[in-house]
Image: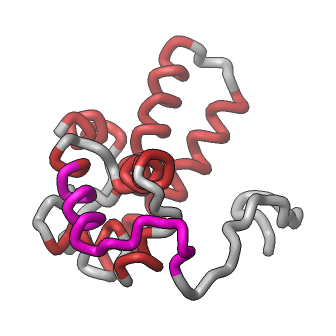
């Protein structure tokens, strides 16, 4: 598969082992796992952080195998979801930090190009989330208001 903003290929990455069933050594109590997810979400952790905590501290290598649902689905069922999806929020934060860097370093052309690519990804994700009705119709990314949105 090709890179998004380059004309080269690359497949090097770590891959999780393919499994269809929960390992025997793992914690597979569905109620306990869902309760822990809700508890961690109320503590302010993101879905990615919840997955890491469950893997490292509670012996759950894969929540979807153990519960049949993804962490995000469990969070949505319990009405603990944020108004902006996590991946979009992370990209917006990255773009915001690049803008702050560019205010002090105006001649940093590499960062300027990377900012353009990151904001293109943000706009692409916004289009997807508006199409899937995860964001309201007419929602537009504006760099000026991104800091206000992220502070919520």
Tell me residue 106's x, y (percent): 59, 18
Q: Say which residue appears at 22% left-offset and 71% top-offset.
A: 31
Q: Say which residue appears at 62% left-offset and 34% top-offset.
A: 112
Say whether residue 83 is magenta. no
Number of marks in picture: 0
- Left or right of residue 108: residue 91: left
Above or below residue 122? Residue 152 is above
Q: Magenta part of the protein: which range?
A: 22-39
Q: Say which residue appears at 42% left-offset and 34% top-offset.
A: 96
User: Is residue 128 or residue 25 the one in the foreground?
Assistant: 25
Tell me residue 68's x, y (percent): 37, 83
Above or below residue 142? Residue 72 is below
- Left or right of residue 113: residue 149: left
Tell me residue 103's x, y (percent): 48, 18
- Left or right of residue 111: residue 82: left
Can residue 126 be seen here? The reply is: yes
User: Is residue 13 or residue 133 the one in the foreground?
Assistant: 13
Quarter of the view holding residue 70:
bottom left
Q: Find the residue positioned furthest to the front.
A: 25
Q: What's the image's color scheme?
A: secondary structure
């Amino acid at each position: 598969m090709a890179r998004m903003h380059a004309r080269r290929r690359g497949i090097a990455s770590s891959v999780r082992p393919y499994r269809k069933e929960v390992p025997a050594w793992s914690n597979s109590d569905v109620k306990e796992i869902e309760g822990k997810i809700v508890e961690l979400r109320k503590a302010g952790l993101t879905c990615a952080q919840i997955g890491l905590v469950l893997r490292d501290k509670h012996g759950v290598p894969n929540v979807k195998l153990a519960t049949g649902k993804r962490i995000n689905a469990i969070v949505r069922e319990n009405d603990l979801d944020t108004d902006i999806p996590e991946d979009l929020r992370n990209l917006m934060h990255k773009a915001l930090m690049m803008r702050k860097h560019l205010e002090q370093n105006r001649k940093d052309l590499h960062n300027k190009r990377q900012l353009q690519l990151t904001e293109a990804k943000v706009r692409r994700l916004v289009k997807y989330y508006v199409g899937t009705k995860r964001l309201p119709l007419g929602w537009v990314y504006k760099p000026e208001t991104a800091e206000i949105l992220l502070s919520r």
